[in-house]
Image (cartoon, rainbow, N blue to C red):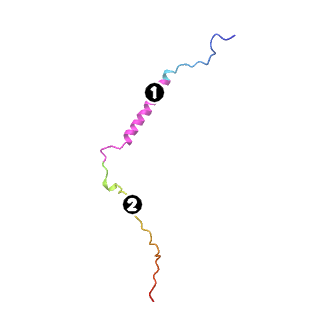
Amino acid sequence: MSPSRPAPRGYHAPRRRREVIVAAIGVALVFAVAVALIWVLAPHEEESIDPSTVIPPIVATTTTAPAAPSTTTSTSPG
């Protein structure tokens, strides 16, 4: 004989209002801290760059290989 109603799966009470409020405040706090850090750490346009601290670009230098030994033989007349 089958039961007339489904087997109980356990009662899940709805979330308490305090838990929802604490979660919303936590999310808002994390968001506010992230926005503040982005604003503080972002470069600002009014900052000028001091030319004495600018690093000059590296110039490529060419190296010369040592001269290969001569393969020509010279004979002296005589």
Total labels drawn:
2
Secondary structure, mark 1, is helix
**Residue 67 x %, y %:** 44, 72
Residue 24 numbered mark, or none: 1
Residue at figure coordinates x 31%, y 54% from the top left: 51
Q: Which residue is drawn at 48% across and 24% down?
A: 20
Main SS of the magenta part reads: helix
**Left or right position of 10 against 63:** right
**Residue lying furthest front in this view?**
78
Label 1 Cα crowd, 10 Å radius (few <14 / some 14-19 / many 20+): few
Q: What stretch is highlighted in magenta?
A: 19-47
Which numbered disc flags the more N-terminal residue, 1 or 2?
1
Q: How far apart are marks 1 and 2 (CA)?
A: 57 Å
Residue 26 among those drawn in magenta = yes
Measuring from the top left, give residue 1's x and y in whole percent: 70, 10
Task: Tell me which residue sits at (37%, 39%) in the image.
Answer: 39
Residue found at x 45% / y 30%: 27
Please tell me whether mark 2 sits on a helix, a strand or a loop: loop
- The label on residue 68 is none
> On screen, 23 above or below 9?
below
30 to 18, vertically: above or below: below
Q: Could you tell me residue 2's position as x and y percent?
A: 67, 11
The residue pinned by badge 2 equals 60
Which marked residue is nearer to the observer: mark 1 or mark 2? 2
Estimate how packed mark 2 is, as few (under 14), some (14 to 19) or many (20 or more) residues with alpha carbons within 10 Å: few
Q: Quadrant of residue 12?
A: top right
Residue type of the residue flagged with mark 1? Ala
Q: Could you tell me which quadrant the C terminus lies in?
A: bottom left
Q: Which amino acid does label 2 sit on?
A: Ala
